[in-house]
């Protein structure tokens, strides 16, 4: 296996390495353990003073086994070479060439590592590697997430490493998107192993880089994942899911899909790690400013139509870490204040990722790109290097774990914002989700979708209100409660098929009823006309009546 990998032509990995305080020592230790013929290209992004000439290139050139050059605008990134960011500059990559923009932004807005990593993810996809080394602050954490989203590898320096200033590596690790946490001296060998694995499996990929064998075993992988986590990704787009499974195989260097399935079944941590990979979401405050301008105008018109009402209800499914929710809260609060009216606003942010919801509830943000200085000062407060939404904004927002594809929706909504989820769903699931949104919205309620999303085929449910901003208005029509999927019956991954069922249907049904009676809260099952079909017993807060009822 190893001999075959060594004879293969290594893929052209481009490794972005970011550091701040303590970076020189970490860089030196890294390159001291790098072979001169790795075939990889390296781009170093260091926090440098804009007021002084940097000696970083000269110092590293003396210590590195490969040439070290200062990046120039338009320079092609070459293998077996180190390219170093110049002082007072922003460095990005496009079509394999470095772009140098001077001067750098003001210090408060300067995130050179994030800027490079984000461009690296966009340009190189799964040939990208991002490494966060020693430094204070959190620069690199957002860009590292973008690299993982694109299929690349992410590494952070271990905080116990003697070369480390812990701030940046800790912030990177806290995102949950770091694949390897290593001492600097261990990183080159891990990169070589990763490179060799990619070379070994290169002939198993189709024209766009997706592993053919992973697609062939997709149903089995998803069945094991569903049995282990309870989450069903079978209606997500095949290509997207396959690439995320492929990425986990690359991180683990699993040569075959059966070997990965065995690992997925036997390692208690792997189902959760794959689940997290399938949920990676890159978000930011006021993402796509032009769309937000259109949304602001649409909400203002909605407020005009709703004069006399006392409340405004908004739902943001797939909200990830909450930036979209708080952006909407700021937008709505500004519009309400400008009108001088009192209005009770509830914004529900939901996601199936419990860790993302915990992050959103905490509301602690170290990256505030997208928020204007005026809004940052008015609606956020700073504490120990991080920004938090003000109490006035926070009180408008409620976060909870919720799966929009299978859980009962919120209702009587004025606005529903769901951007960049639909693109990951297949046609059948998109249809179900759009019907769910139609049910959830009030008449004339607004639906805000991402720039690559729309409502084609659902003209009876939604009309276009603002084509450029991708805002749609709910049409009158049958607002039946959406049909929610029953969880598919899945054989336990380590259980013989003969054991499934375990007896007569009556005995199983009786066991289910006993379990529900003991552990389930009281519930009702109703039809589309609100007629009660089944009642579990017990009191139901808010709808309990002293007299028998047949309808709610």
Image: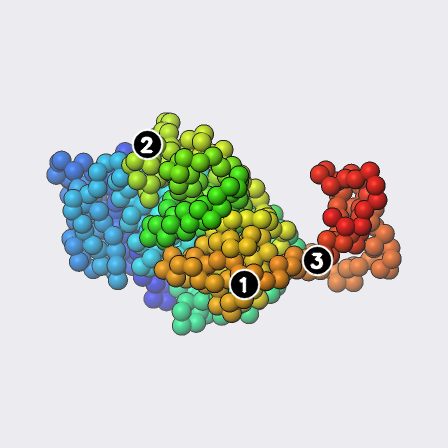
Look at the picture and state if 282 lies above or below 346.
below
Q: Which percent across, then down, holds residue 519?
A: 76, 41
Number of marks in the rendered image: 3
The structure residue drawn at horizontal position 48% and vertical position 54%, both measured from the top left corner, is 446
Q: Which percent across, then down, holds residue 205?
A: 44, 69
Is 280 or 254 nearer to us in this picture?
280
The structure residue drawn at horizontal position 48% and vertical position 58%, both measured from the top left corner, is 473
Q: Mark 2 packing: few (<14 Cα in 10 Å), some, or many (20+)?
A: few
Mark-to-mark CA distance, 1 and 2: 40 Å
Specify whether 437 is left or right of 43: right
The structure residue drawn at horizontal position 60% and vertical position 65%, both measured from the top left corner, is 219
Q: Which percent across, then down, holds residue 176?
A: 47, 43
Secondary structure beneath dot 3 equals: loop
Q: Report the residue marked by disc 3.
A: 528
Q: Residue furthest bottom?
A: 207
In the rendered structure, find residue 32 and report the number of the disc placed on it: none
Of badges 3 and 2, nearer the viewer stands 3
Residue 161 figure quarter: top left
Mark-to-mark CA distance, 3 and 2: 48 Å
Cβ–Cβ under 8 Å for marks 3 and 2: no
Specify whether 34 is left or right of 437: left
Look at the picture and state if 37 lies above or below 388.
below
Is 512 or 116 nearer to us in this picture?
512
Q: Mark 1 packing: few (<14 Cα in 10 Å), some, or many (20+)?
A: many
The structure residue drawn at horizontal position 63% and vertical position 51%, both measured from the top left corner, is 407
Is 111 or 542 nearer to us in this picture?
542
Q: Answer with mark 1 or mark 3, whichever residue precedes in sequence.
A: 1
Look at the picture and state if 202 lies above or below 19.
below
Q: Answer with mark 3 or mark 2, whichever residue precedes in sequence.
A: 2
Secondary structure beneath dot 2 equals: helix
Q: Report the residue marked by disc 2.
A: 377
In the rendered structure, find residue 461 and report the number of the disc placed on it: 1
């Amino acid at each position: 296996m190893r001999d075959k990998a060594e004879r293969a032509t290594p893929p052209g990995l481009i490794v972005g390495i970011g550091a701040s305080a303590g970076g020189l020592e970490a860089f030196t230790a890294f390159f001291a353990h790098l072979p001169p013929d790795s075939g990889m290209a390296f781009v170093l992004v260091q926090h440098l003073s804009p007021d002084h000439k940097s000696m970083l290139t000269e110092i590293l050139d003396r210590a590195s086994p490969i040439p070290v050059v200062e990046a120039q605008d338009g320079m092609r990134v070459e293998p077996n070479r180190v390219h170093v960011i110049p002082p007072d500059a922003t460095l990005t990559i496009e079509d394999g060439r470095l772009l140098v923009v001077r001067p750098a932004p003001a210090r408060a807005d300067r995130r050179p590592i994030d800027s490079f990593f984000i461009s690296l993810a966009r340009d190189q996809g799964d040939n990208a590697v991002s490494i966060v080394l020693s430094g204070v602050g959190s620069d690199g954490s957002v860009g590292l997430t973008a690299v993982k989203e694109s299929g690349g590898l992410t590494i952070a320096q271990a905080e116990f490493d003697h070369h480390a200033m812990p701030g940046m590596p800790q912030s990177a690790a806290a995102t949950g998107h770091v694949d390897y946490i290593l001492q600097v001296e261990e990183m080159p060998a891990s990169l070589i192993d990763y490179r060799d694995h990619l070379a070994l499996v290169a002939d198993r990929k189709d024209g766009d880089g997706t592993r053919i064998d992973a697609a062939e075993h997709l149903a089995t992988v998803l069945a094991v994942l569903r049995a282990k986590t309870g989450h069903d990704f079978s209606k997500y787009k095949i290509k997207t899911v396959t690439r995320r499974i492929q990425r986990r195989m690359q991180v683990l260097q699993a040569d075959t899909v059966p070997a990965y399935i065995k690992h997925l079944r036997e390692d208690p941590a792997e189902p959760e790690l794959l689940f997290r990979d399938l949920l990676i979401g890159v978000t930011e405050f006021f993402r796509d400013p032009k769309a937000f301008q259109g949304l602001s105008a649409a909400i203002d018109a909605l407020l005009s139509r709703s004069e006399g009402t006392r409340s405004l209800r908004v739902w943001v499914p797939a909200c990830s870490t909450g930036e979209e929710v708080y952006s909407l809260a700021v937008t709505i609060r500004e519009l309400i204040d400008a009108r001088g009216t009192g209005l009770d606003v509830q914004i529900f942010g939901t996601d199936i990722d419990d860790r993302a919801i915990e992050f959103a509830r905490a509301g602690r943000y170290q990256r505030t790109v997208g928020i204007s200085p005026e809004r940052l000062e008015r609606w956020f407060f700073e504490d120990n290097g991080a920004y938090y939404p003000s109490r006035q904004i926070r009180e408008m927002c409620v976060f909870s774990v919720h799966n929009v594809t299978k859980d009962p929706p919120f209702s009587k909504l004025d606005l529903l914002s769901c951007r960049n989820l639909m693109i990951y769903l297949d046609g059948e699931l998109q249809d179900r989700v759009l019907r769910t949104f139609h049910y959830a919205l009030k008449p004339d309620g607004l639906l805000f979708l991402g720039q690559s999303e729309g409502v084609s085929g659902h003209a009876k449910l939604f009309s276009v209100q603002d084509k450029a901003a991708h805002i749609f208005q709910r049409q009158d029509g049958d607002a039946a409660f959406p049909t929610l999927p029953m969880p598919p019956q899945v054989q336990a991954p380590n259980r013989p098929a003969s054991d499934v069922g375990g007896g007569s249907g009556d005995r199983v049904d009786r066991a289910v009823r006993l379990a529900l009676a003991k552990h389930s809260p009281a519930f009702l099952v109703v039809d589309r006309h609100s007629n009660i079909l089944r009642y579990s017993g017990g009191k139901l807060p808010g709808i309990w009546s002293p007299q028998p009822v047949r309808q709610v």
